[in-house]
Image: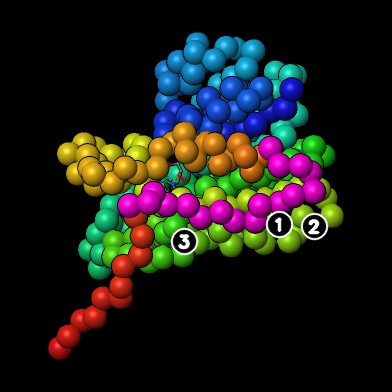
């Protein structure tokens, strides 16, 4: 039985990944800060299939302690899903909070590279699949997306660079780049504004966490000679708009 480590498994895409991988016969190391949500996953999916690891991805000491303590049957990691991440705020750069910018960089970039670096020896040994959650925001800029989009562009380019560095090791790397997925993402981004979140997704028929989890599982289930480099997906009701022009 294979094992996947999913960061940010307490909500949204990560939680759906935990369910999808267990359903497909994998063991899951599920991480996040909200212990009660991880406990609920263990309760639902079984302690033999889900191992909870409670830590903030930015806290390297807590992370290393949790991962040093993995039960033997969860210790060989066949797939790493770097999913934990967030956007904070939609303000234009000139109005944005610098603390929010730093939190996004620490979570979406620094924590992701740090975990990947820490696990690489194991991942090379097991010829693992690394799946990184980037975003359409990596490619298509929008007003107020400033640093969030920057972090996701980093994730995409880091994924491609990692793939290049890992040539010949058998490790595969994929950048997943979704558009609008209805999760707790907008609730977090708006500081808990449920009405704003509901309004954003109303009438869109957005992607779901399960849609993305199915894609992540498909990527991880390809035969060993197939690497999905990058995969961009959107809801049908989301597409591209034109440039803006400021007139004097
Ligand atoms: P959710 O807010 O629903 O879930 C985010 C997950 O990340 C939670 O499990 C949360 O766990 C975890 N997380 C956030 N910060 C930390 C932290 N400091 N330490 C540990 N875990 C953390 O959002 P999504 O499921 O939508 O987002 C998952 C990923 O997908 C993100 O990287 C996001 O950027 C990306 N994405 C999302 C899209 C969308 O439209 N929703 C589109 C494209 C990409 P906890 O709070 O318990 O710690
Ligand atoms: C989340 C998608 O368009 O809100 O990464 O940036 S978007």
Decide: few, some or many residues near mark 1? Use Cα within 10 Å; few <14, some 14-19, many ≥20.
Answer: many
Quadrant position of residue 181: top left
Q: Residue 152, can we see it?
A: yes
- Give x and y (percent) for residue 53: 56, 25
Marks 1 and 3, how far apart at CA? 18 Å
Q: Quadrant of the C terminus?
A: bottom left
Marks 3 and 2, how far apart at CA? 24 Å
Which residue is the site of mark 1? 163
Which residue is the site of mark 2? 167
228 is within the stretch colored magenta: yes
Label 1 sits on a secondary structure element that is helix
Please tell me which residue lies in front, 239 or 95: 239
Please, is residue 8 above or below residue 115 in the view? above
Label 3 sits on a secondary structure element that is helix
Marks 2 and 1, how far apart at CA? 6 Å
Disc number for residue 138: 3
11 is within the stretch colored magenta: no
- Give x and y (percent) for residue 13: 46, 36
Please, is residue 188 above or below residue 156 in the view? above
The reply to whether discs 2 and 1 touch (Cβ–Cβ < 8 Å) is yes
Decide: few, some or many residues near mark 3? Use Cα within 10 Å; few <14, some 14-19, many ≥20.
Answer: many
Q: Residue visible at 66% across and 52% down?
A: 228
Q: Which residues are magenta?
A: 221-237
């Amino acid at each position: 039985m294979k094992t996947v480590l999913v960061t940010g498994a307490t909500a949204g895409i990560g939680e759906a990944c935990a369910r999808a991988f267990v359903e497909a016969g994998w063991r899951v190391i599920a991480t996040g800060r909200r212990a009660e949500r991880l406990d609920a996953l263990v309760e639902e999916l079984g302690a033999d299939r889900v191992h909870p690891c409670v830590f903030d991805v930015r806290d390297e000491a807590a992370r290393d302690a949790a991962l040093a303590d993995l039960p033997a049957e969860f210790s060989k990691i066949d797939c790493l899903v770097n999913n934990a991440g967030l956007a904070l705020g939609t303000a234009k750069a000139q109005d944005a909070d610098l603390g929010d910018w730093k939190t996004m960089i620490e979570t979406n970039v620094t924590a992701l590279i740090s975990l990947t670096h820490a696990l690489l020896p194991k991942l090379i040994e097991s010829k693992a699949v690394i799946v990184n959650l980037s975003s359409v925001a990596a490619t298509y800029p929008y007003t107020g997306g400033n640093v969030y989009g920057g972090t996701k562009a980093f994730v995409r380019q880091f994924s491609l660079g990692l793939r290049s560095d890992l040539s010949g090791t058998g490790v595969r790397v994929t950048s997943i780049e979704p558009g609008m997925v209805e999760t707790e993402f907008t609730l977090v981004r708006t500081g808990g504004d449920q009405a704003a979140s509901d309004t954003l997704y109303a009438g869109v028929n957005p992607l779901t966490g399960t849609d993305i989890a199915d894609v992540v599982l498909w990527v991880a289930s390809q035969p060993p000679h197939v690497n999905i480099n990058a995969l961009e997906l959107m809801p049908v009701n989301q597409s591209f708009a034109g440039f803006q022009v400021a007139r004097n």
